[in-house]
Amino acid sequence: MVDEKYIKGVVFALISLFLVSMQPIVAISRPKVLDAYLFAAMTCIVMALFMFPLIIAERHKYSNLSKKNPAKSDEYRSILNGWKKHKRILIYVGINFAVAQVIFFLAYELAGAINGSLAQQTTIIFALLFGFLIHHEKVTKIQIVFSIILLFGLTFAITQGSFNLLEFNLGVLLMLMTAAIWMLAHTFTKPILEKNESTAIQIVFIRNIISGSLLFSTYFIFFPITNILLLLEPINVFFFIAMGFFYVFDILFWYKSLTNIELSKASVLVSPMPILTAIFAFLILGELLTIHHLIGAFIIIISIIIIVRKKKEDSFVSEKL
């Protein structure tokens, strides 16, 4: 008998795979007049706007559940309002992602979609590292070995097999920095989710409100006020909306997949992201796709699958948030 829930989980994960694979393409394809700072600011604002109705719907759902089941009203109130006890952490996360979002777009500009997407996969290594350092989570020898193998695959792909570290351009280094910044923030928000003191949607919404507000309010300190006219150009507005759309719905479908299938299975399904991005980059952007990229991506994907399967099921829930 076909498991309908399992099929839904697989479909949601595959949709998430497509959406996340398109993000580098949209980021690089944007008009050249849109600098990374403004593009990051508007992406965060658009994401918050997309998520606003989701927040309203979620709060309405838990309010109704609280009324229907008074015995669990305290639990539902904690989910709805527990975030208020963590304002300092959420402010930090908002600032963290404001910085990371700018670096993220700069990284793709300099590294390209293929190399950038490969470097982005190091998030799992930083998740292990910060989980160990901050929450004292266990890291197995197999995870350490395959983290090293993942880095080997990344170096092989980016240097085209030469292993000349001087060929790591600034964009790749910025993407590694972005991955570290992301996962440091996720490490701090993870306990909030585990204690049911917020939801993933609430955290992402609050994060983007703070990030978008911070970036937009400081933008004109560094850039001319006349750049505000860029917000009125239809083509620019299209890319703001497109980037926000791919980002938000990637997170949404990823979250939906986790409600239907195990995290390890969902992670395996989205792990081909570098290969799919490379194909899109080759077809749409005309980037050079080599056998070294494909071999490196294969090594990275296998490494991620093994690392995730050796991790407890709840360890990477917040990884994409």
Image (spheres, grey):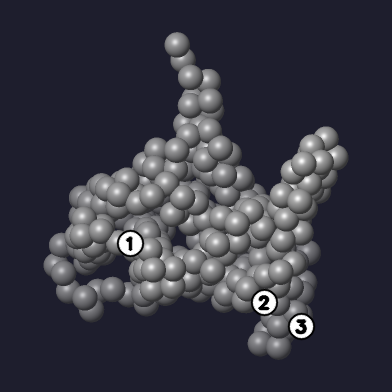
Q: Residue at x 49, y 25 (%)?
A: 7
Q: Amino acid at mark 2?
A: Arg
Q: Which residue is mark 2?
A: 88
Q: In this rendering, does residue 116 appear at all?
A: no
| Residue 174 percent coordinates (x, y) | 42, 74
Query: In this view of the protein, which residue sits in the foreground, 238 or 83?
Result: 83
- Proximity of marks 3 and 1: CB atoms separated by less than 8 Å: no
| Residue 50 percent coordinates (x, y) | 73, 51
Disc nearest the viewer among 3 and 1 = 1
Q: Amino acid at mark 3?
A: Ile
Quote the CA–CA distance across marks 3 and 1: 50 Å
Quote the CA–CA distance across marks 3 and 2: 31 Å
Q: Residue furthest left?
A: 162
Q: Which mark is residue 225?
A: 3
- Sequence order check: which comes first, mark 3 or mark 1? 1
Q: Amino acid at mark 1?
A: Lys
Disc nearest the viewer among 3 and 2 = 2
